[in-house]
Image (spheres, helix red, strand yellow):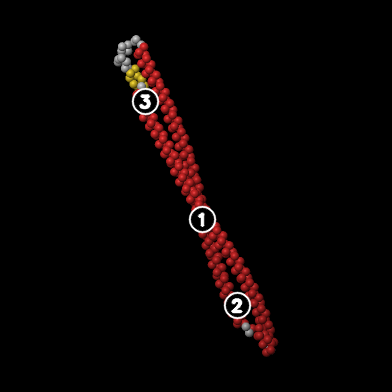
Amino acid sequence: QTLPKDIKRPRKLEIRCRVEDITATHEASVLEVENSHTIAIAVLQDEHDSKVQELMSAHELEKKELEENFEKLRLSLQDQVDTLTFQNQSLRDKAKRFEEALKKNTEEQLEVALAPYQHLEEDMNSLKQVLEMKNQLIHQQEKRIMELERLAEINLILEEKIQVLQQQNEDFRVRIDQNTVVTRQLSEENANLQEHVEKETEEKKRLSRTNEELLWKLQAGDAMSHVKLSPTSPTPIYCCSSGPPTPVKVSTVPR
């Protein structure tokens, strides 16, 4: 009666160890994958949000400054243009009066006509300085425009990088979904294996009980029967093991 139990225990322990090892390995792998993916996605998302926020803030600030400077420059240039227009018209009027005075060819009228032009050289120098300042402002504005175009190109590059980061984020999500599917499959396989182990254990218990009943019946039959059995005719009794059933020969001794 002790032989089937000795054969059954190592097999049962081996199956239990295999199930525990598979379960522990599966849980550790799932936990490691989930942790690594969660950390990677969180880091990428934080970097992405930080870069986008910094770029947007810098871009809006630079844009606002450029707009304010451009408006100031436009107003300043408009005032200068108005001033130059007025001065030009004034000079035209003076030149017209000077021409009319020359036509009259009178000394007195010539002196009167030349009187407003005593400071003509100074006025021309002032106009020259104004024009130089205007050219400098236009040159500065061109530099501002070039800088704005450069910032626009940088913004395009950053938008492309943002799209790449978004694609990487989407790839990570797909991988997480795939790992979730694999985890579900492993859980189902683990459940199926556990169910198989339980069925095999129940079957071994049933076979063990059947074997014990047969041994008991055989011993009881030997004690009660008056029929002599031949020593060369052993009765095969099957014991439970991890492989195919193995007959155990039980010899009966004639009375």
The residue at 53%/61% (across/down) is 151
Q: Secondary structure at mark 1?
A: helix
Secondary structure of the residue carrying tag 2 is helix
The answer to which of 112 and 5 lies nearer the viewer is 5
Amino acid type at circle 3 is Lys
The structure residue drawn at horizontal position 52% and vertical position 53%, both measured from the top left corner, is 49
Q: Amino acid at mark 1?
A: Lys
Label 1 sits on residue:
51
The mark nearer the N terminus, 2 or 1, is 1
Looking at the image, how many numbered discs can be counted on the residues?
Answer: 3
Which residue lies most toward the top here? 226
In this rendering, the answer to whether 146 lies above or below 42 is below
CA separation in Å, label 2 and label 1: 49 Å
| Residue 237 placement: quadrant | top left
> Can you identify the residue that label 2 sits on?
127
Relative to residue 245, is residue 141 drawn left or right? right
Provide residue 35's location: percent of width, then percent of height.
Answer: 46, 45
- The amino acid at mark 2 is Leu
Label 2 and label 3: CA atoms lie apart by 118 Å
The residue positioned 38% from the left and 16% from the top of the image is: 217
Q: Residues within 10 Å of mark 1 (few under 14, many from 20)?
A: some
At x 43%, y 32%, the residue is 193
Is residue 160 visible to us here? no
Residue indicated by mark 3? 5
Q: Secondary structure at mark 3?
A: helix
Q: Residues within 10 Å of mark 2 (few under 14, many from 20)?
A: some
Circle 2/circle 3 CB separation < 8 Å: no
